[in-house]
Structures are given as C-alpha cells and as structure tokens.
Amino acid sequence: MNIGRKHRPFYGYVIIAACFVIMLVFWGTYNTFGVFFESLLKEFGWSRAMTSGAIAANGILMGIFFILVARWCDRYGPQLVIGLCGVALGLGYFLMSRVSSGWQLYVFYVVLVAIGMGAYIAMLPIVARWFVKRRTLMMAVVFCGMGVGMMLVPPLISQLILSRGWRFSYMIIGIIGLVGIGGGAQFLRRDPRQLGQLPYGGTEGQSTNPAQATGVSFLEALHTRQFWLVSMLYFIYLFCELVILVHIVIYATRSLAVPEVSAAAILSFIGFSLIVGMLVMGIVANRFSSKMAFMVSFAIMVVSFVWLLMAKELWMLSLFGVLVGFSSGGMQILYAPITAELFGLRSHGVILATSGFIGGIGSAVGPWAAGKIYDTNDSYLLAFIICAILAAIGLIMAISLTPLHKREGPKNSAERPQIEEITRP
C-alpha cells in the first residue's frame, strides 16, 4: 500500500462535504421542534412542560447514544453505523406524522430521533483524524452545515405546515432525514489509511488509529479539572440554546403576537449568525486564544439574554437571534478542537461523547424547565432570567480555564501525553 501516493485526490474533502450535508440535515430537522410546538398544542391540548418534555428526554437519551455510536463507529465503521442512524432518524420523524397520543410522541421522537441524532458527535473524531493541519477550519466548515440547516429548514417547514399541515410536514422531514443522512454516510471513511492516504498535514510516522494515537485515556481525562470545566460550559451552552430553539417561536407568537412565519424566521437569523460566529470566533481563536474566544462568546450570550428581557417587537427579537446565534457559533466551533488539543486523539471520540452527554443533560433540562415555568407562571420571564444567569456563570468558568499540562499533567514528564495548551487552537 503506497500511503505516500500524491496523484490520488485527497479524500478528506469528500469527508468534509458529507459531514456538512449530514450536519445540515441533523440540525435543520432537529430545530423544527419549536415550529411544530404550536400545532401539537392545538391538536392535543398538551401542556408546554409535557410537550417540551419530549425534547428534554430526547436530549438525555441522545447523550447516551453519543457515547454508544462513537464506540460503534470505531468498531463497525461510520458507513454502517451512521447510515443506520439515518434510518432511525427518518423513521422517527415519519412516524411523528402518525402521532395520536402522548406516549407515541415519546416513543417516536424521544427514542428513534435520539438514536439518529446520536451520530452527531461520532462525525467529529472522523474530521479530526483526516486533518492535522486546518483541523479547526474544517470543523468550522462542517459546523456551518448546522447554521445552514437552521437557516433553511425551519422557515420552509413553517410554510409547509401552513399550506399542507403538520402531519404532512413531518413526513417530508422523515424523507429528508433518511436520504440526507443515510446517503451521506456512505461517503464516510473512519481513517485516511483505509484509502492509503495520510491525514492532511500528517506524516508517515503519525498514526490516526485511536489505539496508537497520542493523548490521555478516557479515565485519565475524567480526573482532570479541564474535562469538567469544558463539559459544564457545554451544559450551559446547550441549556440556553435549547430553551430558545424550542420556545422562542411560540413565545413570539403567543406572548408578542408575532405572525407564525415571521416568528419562525427568527431561527433563520440564529442560523445565519451561527455561521458568522463560527468563522469570526475561529479567527479570534487562531489569532489570540481559544480561551479568549470562549470568553467573548459567553459575554455576547449574556448580552443577548439581557436584550431578550427587554425585547417587545419583532426587530428586537431578530437582533436577539443574531446575538445568541453568534455566541452559539463561537462555542460550538471550539468544542471538538479543544477536546482534541486538551486530551489528544487517543480517546477523542469517547471523551467528546461523554462531555457531549453532560451537555446533553443541559439540552434536556433547559426546554423542559422553561415549559414548566410557563405553565406555572404564564410567562417565560423567569426562564430567560435563569439563562442570563447561567451565561454569566459560563463567562466566569471560561475565564478560569487554564492549560492542561500546567495544572493537570502527570508529574513525570516522560509519561506526559503530547497535549497542546487549551489556548492554542
């Protein structure tokens, strides 16, 4: 096998394109839950806590599948595993079109969609293995699929619901999920050496096999302060983000009397600014530090929620969408590269997935708590205040981030894994 052959086109960019499409479908369809929220309440008369509890339970189960799917991809390959996840996701959304009771909502959306979404984290180590240089940039390109999906899918589905109804719209989402993810997965390859290539910027002696890659083990990572700090930052980020993605549309329509299509467009503002935030914060991280980018992102999130508390008109909600999307983009783009930089690639997938599980708890608790608060107080005010406070706590935690090897590294330099500082993206 001639690993050094240069005439063969580098397959890593096919990986990036496939991951971009899969990410677009994942998050474009996932973020339509808030668009369907009003229709489900009208159809079945459920409480907001009960309805948003579906996405809460989905978030917890999704976190479990983050870990399982990451392991299965290493064992069986991403083509098979992520392809099957696409089948589960498409089936879950398709069956949502047939929902007639609360238990079906929880089986179809919580279980099947969570299995499908479990493949999200598993794609990130694949990108990390294919690129040594330009890793952060390639992560940014992949994550831009998330922003594009948020820009395109929720407004289109909102229009489709108005013209054809929510059941037909869920059928369309199911087809999109099955074709987009199942098809895209067939282009994935776990490791460049499977095709006789080197990772971009890699060398002959550098392995991308998880068993041979440098870094700390999963158990070693669990004993570091940095692991828990990054995990809690992800928890706060997802808590606040999912509160908005699930409840902002119905808050705008019910509380501020914004037309449904205009309210759904707020998600497009979030999606667009999410892309901008990824690109800008990626530049900030490369020019200054990842810590600085985290700090700026959380500071903007604090400002966004303070602004939301004052927002009473559509333009003010749209500006909020721009601010919160920008901050979310910054946080999202830094998560996987920092995990690789802190702990290496040896256990990157499972470390990333476990940290993602902790963050997934935030995505579960956030929307359910906001729904419960509204059912109790007939207002989202307290929920938005809690998000502002959590964002401020996240800012303080981001400030406290320090390089791993200075505080958490093994005392014996011969045993210390080759890990860069967190401040070097």
Image: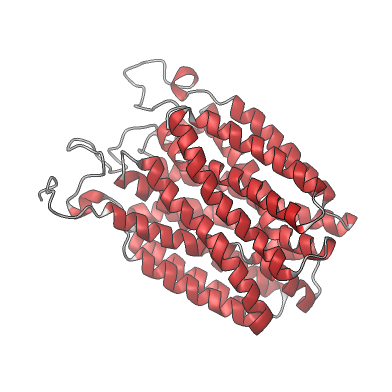
Residue shown at the point (70%, 34%) measured from the top left: 392
- The number of numbered badges drawn on the structure is 0
Residue 288 lies left or right of residue 46; in this view the side is left
Residue 277 lies left or right of residue 347; in this view the side is right
Near-viewer residue (232 or 29) = 29
Residue 325 percent location from the top left of the image: 61, 49
Near-viewer residue (359 or 276) = 276
From this viewpoint, is residue 98 visible?
no
From this viewpoint, is residue 300 visible?
yes
Residue 280 percent location from the top left of the image: 50, 41
Scheme by which the image is coloured: secondary structure
Residue shown at the point (44%, 21%) measured from the top left: 405
Residue 209 lies left or right of residue 352; in this view the side is left
In the picture as drawn, the residue positioned furthest to the right comes out as 377
Residue 392 lies left or right of residue 82; in this view the side is right
Q: Hey, which quadrant is residue 244 in on the image?
A: bottom right
Q: Hey, which quadrant is residue 225 in on the image?
A: top right
Residue shown at the point (46%, 41%) measured from the top left: 351
Near-viewer residue (83 or 221) = 83
Q: From the image, which quarter does the C terminus lie in?
A: top left
In the picture as drawn, the residue positioned furthest to the front comes out as 315
101 is higher (above) or lower (below) than 419: below
294 is higher (above) or lower (below) than 78: above
Residue shown at the point (77%, 53%) measured from the top left: 370
Residue 116 percent location from the top left of the image: 50, 64
Residue 211 percent location from the top left of the image: 30, 41
